[in-house]
Image: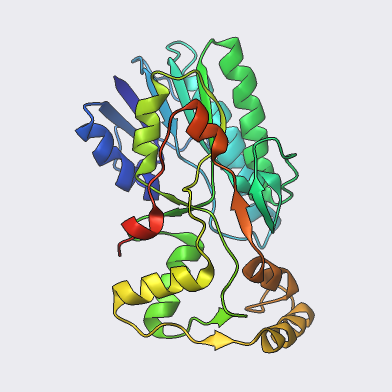
Amino acid sequence: MKILFTGANGFLGRNVIPILKEKSFQVKTCGTHDADYVFDISEKVLQINEKFDIIFHAAGKAHCIPKTNDEEKQFYNVNFEGTKNLCRSLENNTPQIFIFVSTVAVYGDDFGEDISEDFPLEGCTPYAKSKIMAEKFLEEWCENYNVKLFIFRAPLIVGPNPPGNLGDMMKAIKKGTYFNIGGGKAKKSLLWVEDFAELTYRSITHSGGVYNVCDDFSPNFKEIAEKISSLLRKKAPKNIPFIIAKLMALGGDLLGNKAPINSHKLNKIIKDLTFSNTKIKREMDFSPTNVMEKFQI
């Protein structure tokens, strides 16, 4: 089967495309450089004259906090308008399957346990809102064009050389500047990046839907930090007592966004945030990888 993989030069593309090729998929890539289709989906519609069986839409903007109105607008330009432009490029040759990589940020929860797909979409950041808009557009577009749609809402995605918060955590552990707070007991859902290849394969024989995608084991920050430290051959991070972290956070509240920690960030660090994968395991017969066992640097 032929796949068009958007965002092919990103973290997912680097890790998933080689496995798809091993599974005998014929993969073509779309990106802003070094791709079969070179174009910026946020800026224009491209005429795609060949037919693809599957679209794997991983292109998107994430991993940063907007500081200006222009930076905030970029989330909508890429994640929402870019998705619309991609779909318009496909209307003369619609695929059988459309896979959209979304995010658990659409729920808008900073803490909670076993959050399921039935929870309301209350994400209020530009990242979350742009993904919600893209999801709703795709649901309508895929219904109109009789395309089978899979929306995969991912938490923290783990794999070699990860971007975002996990990448920052690894760098801090390497430098010896990472500390657990209050014992690092807060649990977080994770997903092994290569599992997207297995989900793509399973999409062929399943009917589509909206799914949380994460593994069965939600490790806490202490377990994650100790695993990374072991792989880097570094000492396990030390602990900052909660009361000290709380005082630092209160100071950060006064300093604003430039502060390394504030009360909002502290709450995200010390409280559980886990998601239910019951639906995808049941409906797609999916067995997720144990991230902590697979983890590598």
Q: Position of residue 239 (x, y in %)?
A: 54, 86
Q: Is residue 281 above or below residue 73?
A: above
Q: Residue at x 41, y 75 (%)?
A: 226
Residue 40 percent across, percent down from the top left: 46, 38
Q: Where is residue 126 in the image (x, y as percent from the top left)?
A: 68, 49
Task: Say which quarter of the image contains residue 230.
Answer: bottom left
Q: Which colour scheme is used?
A: rainbow
- Give the residue at x 47% y 24%: 98
Q: In which quarter of the image is residue 159?
A: bottom left
Q: Which residue sits at x=35%, y=34%?
A: 198
Asked where in the image residue 180 lies, by quadrant, the reply is bottom right
Q: How many labels does the image show?
A: 0
Q: Which residue lies at the image location 64% right of the left edge and 26% below the top edge?
A: 137
* 124 relative position to 52: left or right: right
Q: Which of 167 and 293 is in front in this view?
A: 293
Q: State left or right for residue 220 relative to residue 196.
A: right
Quadrant occupied by the C terminus: bottom left
Q: Can residue 2 be seen in this view?
A: yes
Q: Can residue 38 be seen in this view?
A: no
